[in-house]
Image (spheres, rainbow, N blue to C red):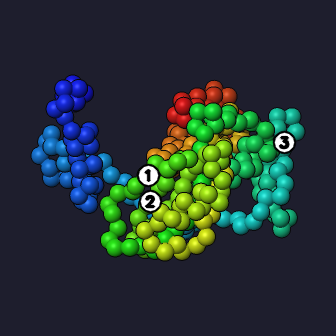
Amino acid sequence: WLKARQLGRAGDLGDYALQTTAARQGRFLPGASDAPPGSPLAAVAYAYHFDASLYARYLRGFAEKLGVTRHEGKVVQVAQRAGDGFVEAVVLENGERIEGDLFIDCSGFRGLLIEQTLQTGYEDWSHWLPCDRAMAVPCARVGDPTPYTRSTARGAGWQWRIPLQHRTGNGYVYCSRHLSDDGAAATLLANLDGEALAEPRPLRFVTGRRKQAWNRNVVAIGLASGFMEPLESTSILLIQTGILRLLDMFPDRGFDPVLVERYNRAVEFEYE
């Protein structure tokens, strides 16, 4: 294609990609299991978008049916073990003390255990990826949903459009050094397909990762371990691979430092 392009004989690269061509025509195929060997139809790449809150509710019910016990409450204190600093327990606002051998920090950007308690440190990648804020707003669905998501370049970042069955998700990821929050909200609202269903919700983040995803007996997964702007849904992928990696390297009470180091090296490699 590169050679033909130089000679002026090739079209846009997307003209030769099955998924791109299908998307332009509003078509979708979740892989053809009966396609002949070697056919490009047999390896069509695709993904689904779910309503995040509905999906979380489903996973909660699924886990509780398998025996998981859920304790609802706000963590107000973290107890550490004398000597090695391992997290011994978390104390909730109602006074309940929950002890454990292994803690998974899913507290988001706050990093309640991995950072606020263990002070693991954070690698700031803003000099490489300058976008540090986002505005998100749902809007009413207009017409049949497209079988693809859309990323649109804007002056200070990019805008997402994600169609769901009952609404369309929209957001503007931008660099605050080049655009104000009010300016981002105005740009976003001016570029919606349908009526906005809420006020734009601001999000702030620092692109980068924890210096250690696993520190002592705490494993950070999701936003607690790091974040890159959501252009390719990397955060969802990193949550999934973090869980699978932990299952593969699950510790005993000895917390072998070789295992911890191996886990951290793998996470570091994947993020980078």
Q: Which residue is identified by label 1?
A: 152
Q: Could you tell which of marks 2 and 1 lies nearer the N-terminus?
A: 1
* Three-letter amino acid code at the position of disc 1: Thr
The image quadrant that residue 178 belongs to is top right
What's the residue at 60%, 54% (across, down)? 134
Residue 138 pos. (x, y %): 52, 68
How far apart are the two marked residues, 3 and 2, measured between alpha carbons? 47 Å
Q: 65 above or below 149?
A: below
Q: Is mark 1 on a helix, strand or loop?
A: strand
How far apart are the two marked residues, 3 and 1, measured between alpha carbons? 50 Å
**Farthest residue, direction right:** 82
What's the residue at 15%, 39% (across, down)? 38
Given contact means CB atoms under 8 Å apart, are the residues at marks 2 and 1 in contact? yes
**Residue 81's disc number:** 3
Q: Which residue is identified by label 2?
A: 161
Q: 48 above or below 231?
A: below
Query: Foreground residue, 187 or 27?
Result: 187
Instruction: Answer left or right for 96 relative to 20.
Output: right
* Three-letter amino acid code at the position of disc 2: Arg
Residue 16 pos. (x, y %): 21, 41
Does the rendering let one see residue 267? no
Q: Is mark 2 on a helix, strand or loop?
A: strand
Instruction: Answer left or right for 201 relative to 112.
Output: left
Q: Could you tell which of marks 3 and 1 lies nearer the N-terminus?
A: 3
* Three-letter amino acid code at the position of disc 3: Arg
What's the residue at 73%, 50% (across, down)? 110
